[in-house]
Amino acid sequence: MAISNIHETLLMYTKQKALINNKISTVMMNMLNSSKQTAEAQSKYNNKVDAYYHEYYELYPDQYEMLVEQAEQDHELELATINSWEEELELEKNNLETQLNEVSTFETTWTKLLQSNIKSDFSYGGVQQ
């Protein structure tokens, strides 16, 4: 009876680990997406500044400076938003990894208990005379 209860507990921990690993995978995919968004934002900013240079730099230098400054402010705001999201994702990942370590520790403890119970059943005999 005790062995079957320990098996159930181990299965519960296995399920928890699978769920946590799935959440970690989702967070890691979101971190990858945030890196992609950062690169896309930088590319968009570079293209915009390049277009302003070719359009305004020689003919309208004052307007060029104003447009570049506005583009830079918009770019910095976008990067700050992405960085904030990345920080949240990193925190969530760390929390999930901590949970995974705790569950793994519990699972190891219960596995040792199961081995001990099986060993004692075979050492002392599970059959009564």
Image (tube, helix red, strand yellow):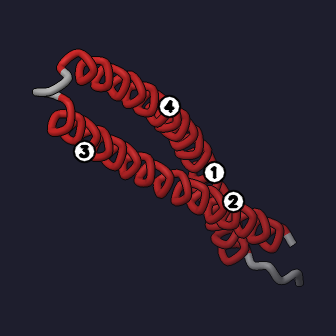
Q: Is residue 6 visible?
A: yes
Mark nearer the viewer, 2 or 1: 2
Secondary structure beneath label 1: helix
Q: Which residue carries the number 4 mark?
A: 81
Question: Where is residue 62, by image quadrant?
Answer: top left
Q: Residue at 40% across / 48% down in the picture?
A: 37
Question: Where is residue 49, by image quadrant?
Answer: top left
Amino acid type at mark 4: Thr
The answer to the question of whether label 2 and label 1 lie on touching residues, with beta carbons closer than 8 A, is yes
Which numbered tag is attached to residue 16? 2
Residue 38 x, y percent position in the rendering: 36, 43
Question: Where is residue 88, by image quadrant?
Answer: top right
Q: Is residue 65 above or below residue 96?
A: above
Report the Cα–Cα distance between label 4 and label 2.
32 Å
Which numbered tag is attached to residue 47? 3
Mark nearer the viewer, 3 or 4: 3
Q: Is residue 116 visible?
A: no
Secondary structure beneath label 4: helix
Q: Residue at 28% across / 25% down in the picture?
A: 68
Q: Is residue 78 above or below residue 47?
A: above
Residue 76 x, y percent position in the rendering: 38, 25
Amino acid type at mark 1: Val
Residue 106 x, y percent position in the rendering: 64, 50
Amino acid type at mark 2: Gln
Amino acid type at mark 3: Asn
Crowd tier of the residue under label 4, counting other residues whose Cα lies within 10 Å: few below 14, some 14–19, many 20 or above: few
Which numbered tag is attached to residue 103? 1
The answer to the question of whether label 3 and label 4 lie on touching residues, with beta carbons closer than 8 A, is no
Q: Is residue 85 left or right of residue 9?
A: left
Which numbered tag is attached to residue 37? none
Q: Which of the two discs, 3 and 4, labels the residue nearer the N terminus?
A: 3
